[in-house]
Amino acid sequence: MKAIEVLQNVYKVRIPVKGYPVERTVAEDIIKLFDMDIDIQPVEQPDMKSETGVFNISVATEELKKMVFKQSSELPSGKEWVYFSIDENNCCWLISSKPYFLYAAFSYVKEKLMEYEVSYLKNWMREISFPLMKSTFDLFLTQYARNIRSFNREQYVREYARLGFTHIEVNALAASTPCEEGVPGEFYPDFYTYCPALDQFVASRLNQGIYPEEYLQKNIDLLKENANTAIRYGLTPGLLCFEPRSVPEDFFKRYPTLRGARVDHPFRSFKPRFNLSLAHPVVQKHYAELIMNLLKEVPELEFLTVWTNDSGAGFEHTKSLYVGKNGGAYLIREWKDDDEIVQAAAANIINFFRLLRDAAYKINPHFRIIARLEPFYGEQKYLWPELGDRIDVEANSFFSKGWENNYPHPRYEDIKVSGSAYQNKVLDREKGPIEELHSRKSRAFLTNSFNTYSNHEPLLGIPFPWLTHEKLRASWNAGILNMSHQGGLQPPEKVPYAVNQEIFCSFQFNPDMDIDREILAVAERYVDEHDAGDMVKGWQLTEEAIRSFMPLSIYTHYGVVWQRLFVRPLVPDIDRIPEEERAYYEKFMCSSIHNPNRVDLARDVLFELVSKDYAYRVFNLIDENVWGPINAALSLFKVKMEEAGRYKKPRVLRVFKDQHFRIRALKSLFETLRNTAVWIYAVHEYLDTQDLSEKASCRKLLDEMIDREIQNCRELIRLWKESSVEWMIVAKTSETPFIYGDNFPELLERKMNLMEKHRHDEPYIDPDYMFRVTDNPYG
């Protein structure tokens, strides 16, 4: 007899009377799965017995652990586990060591064990590979892509639980825009749309009335909704905040002596932003009251991830503050020597973390602080020894200093990568710092990203399952226990064939799996045995193209959207386009009006993003190594689509068509990035050289690039019109600086028209662009 036959004859589902919400969630889903017309029976622990036709569901108790131990002879020592059994009475048992693994266990049984013989499932048990898997900077649930159209939040949270995640961030702004005042021409207020601070949800006695009550109520209502959904699926909810973040200037009209550090980016803002001076005891009481008020509303919150020194947040007198070491009057005298300032700044940081931890402890003793240390490259040597006792760390690496990239690109070893899917190795050097933190009761979370964020934004559903596995396997081999996944997941309603996530899920239950067999098994679930091999071959070719791609600074992270690369014209002299004709995209660029990036793709504010030599290497390597495999993948998927159509295989057709559309989008993304690299090299080389033949070569490169990018725009418009899948993040309302909107094809048309109109302009970049002043009396 098979497991599915036993489950179809279940007539009673039992859960503990005093248990966890996820136990009822699983029970309800079992009833839905088999369309059972029965009730869920909450019982006391002794009444959870073996009876024919009964399904017992529970998070492990001491009594159940003894039962499992008796049945299976052993429990994993110090490990998290899940257990499924059909005993001699044909009674079903589903037990997990922690609530956050119960739904994952149910999903695994439903998806992979139904066809097994009962004899195989007498005592099925799996250890969990990573006992803590948290989300951070979740694009879709809490951050800037939360405004994506047709987003199903419950289905998205359920996917976290299905995959074997444990912790999930839940704080998001309810409105599409933040409550932050700016001045004309300034981009800065938009940065406040993500990582909302504590004061966006509750008030203290100190800042009462600074933010409208209705605004705070809507935000806390959404936070509660997200948290409650997470809890129903067994997940632990928490927060991701930029702290200490700036406060409105109205606050300082009340309390001028509490002004702290200036924390805005002087090149992106036209109005100074200040946070509160954490060294002041009144400010400390304010923050303690904020975190306690928030936990009174949602006591189940168990962590706060603190990001800082960016987007209007930062600590006083730290080296990486945007406007240098500055702060209020209470921390240290500004003329002290550097080391004294560093020590004082480090002490201020750790005291803030402890303050939040200890205040939250009064309501939830399990509450923890999770810090990013990269911004504190100046203070790290003094911070590190103080970490411990529920003050945790998440990082791309634990032995690097600051934002150093110390991992090699999978194909080009001299290129250093960090945080993205290209960081597919974990060195043994990570073990020492991690073990040191663990000895002090501090957790270490290694960051990872296997989806859209930091890889192929704004595209959805790009497959790279082997890279995904390599990072997981390398982390597991290095003894990493905890991982922090940046950017969230692929929304299931938009990406029904998310192979990267399936590999992640399988790894949680079986780290020793044969990756090639597992990927083939995923393909067989998506299509069938006959077509699965070709699906795998298409993924292999796609991943070969991805591995061969050379990253291009922020443009391969988020810049295709933030810097509007998809829709801004690539012409020899961008400045020759009148400002009113550029407004359609510059209005939404992450850029101030004096940012040289508006006319020079090689620069952003005072940074050189990409050198011309690096750009030259990028587009040549793309031409040599990327187009062959990606075109082969597209050809294969097209052949399989036509074959599935001929043989009347609608499911197979649907899957191959889905993959074909997504890889077409990936090719267009790579093409735009390649052409950006050509622009950087050709324009800068044209301006640098005095050799007329070299200038002619640059001119030819630009002409060819313009032809290619115009053709690429046409392909994107065709893809937009033809595609039956959601291959790109699209806003549910109008476009924002972080998401393209429904007007995407119209913007591409405008781009093409401007490129045709200005293709023959002389290459030029105004070296004094950033110094321009409107109505300059001296100009």
Image (cartoon, helix red, strand yellow):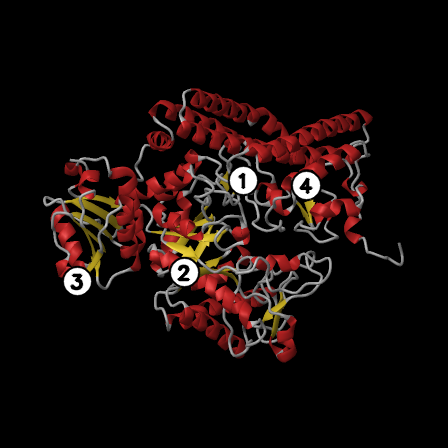
Work out whether mark 4 precedes mark 3 in sequence or the reverse, and give the earlier one.
3
Q: What distance separates the C-alpha of mark 4 from that of mark 3?
A: 62 Å
Compared with residue 406, is residue 135 higher up or lower down, i.e. above or below? Answer: below
Work out whether mark 2 precedes mark 1 in sequence or the reverse, and give the earlier one.
2
**Quadrant of the snapshot with the N terminus:** top left
Q: Name the residue under label 3.
A: 44
Q: What residue type is labelled 1?
A: Leu
**Quadrant of the snapshot with the C terminus:** bottom right
Disc assigned to residue 48: none
- Is mark 2 in CB contact (under 8 Å) with mark 1? no
Q: What distance separates the C-alpha of mark 3 from that of mark 1?
A: 49 Å
Q: Which amino acid does label 2 sit on?
A: Ala
Front position in the image: 648 or 505? 648
Quarter of the figure with residue 208: bottom right
Disc assigned to residue 747: 4
Q: What distance separates the C-alpha of mark 3 from that of mark 2?
A: 27 Å
Residue 446 visible? The answer is yes
Quarter of the figure with residue 279: bottom right
Residue 60 visible? The answer is no
Q: Name the residue under label 2.
A: 227
- Is mark 3 in CB contact (under 8 Å) with mark 2? no
- Tag 1 secondary structure: loop
- Tag 2 secondary structure: helix
- Taking the image as shown, residue 587 lies to the left or right of residue 481, namely right
Work out whether mark 4 precedes mark 1 in sequence or the reverse, and give the earlier one.
1
Q: Residues within 10 Å of mark 2 (few under 14, many from 20)?
A: many
Work out whether mark 3 precedes mark 1 in sequence or the reverse, and give the earlier one.
3
Q: Which amino acid does label 4 sit on?
A: Leu
Q: Mark 1 points at which residue?
A: 459
Compared with residue 315, is residue 445 higher up or lower down, i.e. above or below? Answer: above
Q: What distance separates the C-alpha of mark 4 from that of mark 1?
A: 17 Å
Q: Which amino acid does label 3 sit on?
A: Glu
